[in-house]
Amino acid sequence: MRYVVSASQRIKTYRIFFIIMRMTLLYILIAFLMTACGNTGTSTASESSSAADSAVASDVKPFDGDGAFAMTKQQCDFGPRVPGTAAHAQCADWLMTTLKASCDTVILQTGTVQTATEGSLGIKNIIGVINPDASQRLLLLAHWDTRPWADNDPDAANHRKPVMGANDGASGVGVLLQLAKQLKQDSTTLGIDIVLVDAEDMGVDDNEESWGLGTQYWVQHPHAEGYKPLFGILLDMVGASDATFTREYYSTQYASGFVDLVWKNAAGSHFINAQGGAVTDDHIFVNRAGIPCVDIIDLRSDSPTGFCPEWHTLNDTMGAIDPATLAEVGQTLLNIIASLEQ
């Protein structure tokens, strides 16, 4: 993924900045007016957590962050999962096996996409289906490939080396694999589709269509005819100890009501009830296909890249992953599932 508000895109930076500033001023004005009427329309992070407590059933079981950490580590043990490499193929086999242990149906979707720099590329989207006959469905996504180039590394000598992608890719996949495992043990009536997309991170700046290639392929070839879930949630970079999950801009534009639902059920202090920046990520293409989709992604307002310092560097390793953060994200998903079941 890439942060739209970046130093290399000053025009877009200013345009999005002023949009967000106008939205912020509007929120302040609404909060002021509602306060004057005796009802505040805003909430702090702690208030948001309290709302989550009352929004879900009291019997929601805790999410196993250590299990998600182990699932994340297993992916990294294969090495960088760059499409076309042996590590990529080995990890694909493991993902299929792992999902088959938890899901009712597992689909390997293969195809060919065109990259901006490498020509045609074979991809593998891996899809786990829970309760295939349920009409009410939730879409959960994460990308499992890793970037071929550490082009944000502080050492220019590393810019053509592949990224391990512990956070950028593996963390979201790890949470979804552990979620599927727990749902196997504690069944749900909801239909859930876990879509692990390939070739998200082959993109280049100033070419939005060069990102999310596996997702673009999937929206053109959905795994089920007429597929229309209630909405989707994308997980991306959800493992850092100091992660900040704000309301991503495009998620708010396309799926504001579902953003509200996610933050109402958010579990923990990493979820900050504030407007964040705009990101070109897999959710863009899902939203354009008519499926509302929310991006839970670590956004840093004080970072020149908009992301954590490990992003697209050789430092994106398991040392940057915290089981407690994974647990918060997984618990949020369990809370949402429980709220939808109600």
Image (cartoon, grey):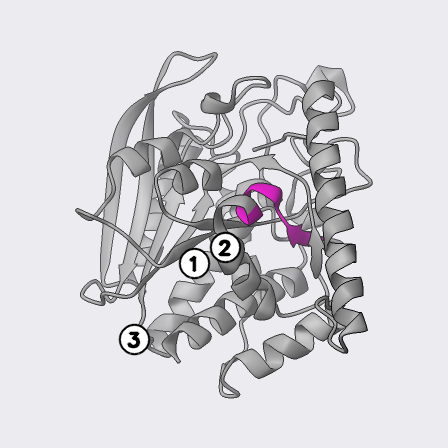
Of residues 315 and 173, the one drawn nearer to the viewer in this rendering: 173
Q: Which residue is mark 2?
A: 174
How far is the residue under mark 3 from the one under mark 1?
A: 18 Å
Report if residue 71 is visible in the image.
no
Position of residue 152 in the picture relative to residue 148 (left or right): right
Q: Which residues are magenta?
A: 244-252
Q: Are marks 1 and 2 in contact (CB under 8 Å)?
A: yes
Q: Is residue 235 magenta?
A: no
Q: Amino acid at mark 2?
A: Gly
Residue 329 position (above or below residue 285): below
The part of the image, by quadrant, that contains residue 49 is bottom right
* Residue visible at 58% across and 38% down in the picture: 165
Q: Is residue 245 magenta?
A: yes
- Answer with mark 3 or mark 1, whichever residue precedes in sequence: 1
Task: Say what secondary structure mark 2 lies in.
Answer: helix
How far is the residue under mark 3 from the one under mark 2?
A: 23 Å
Position of residue 196 in the picture relative to residue 255 (left or right): left
* Residue visible at 67% across and 52% down in the picture: 246
Q: Characterize the local packing of mark 1: few (<14), some (14-19) or many (20 or more) Cα atoms within 10 angstroms.
A: many
- Answer with mark 3 or mark 2, whichever residue precedes in sequence: 2
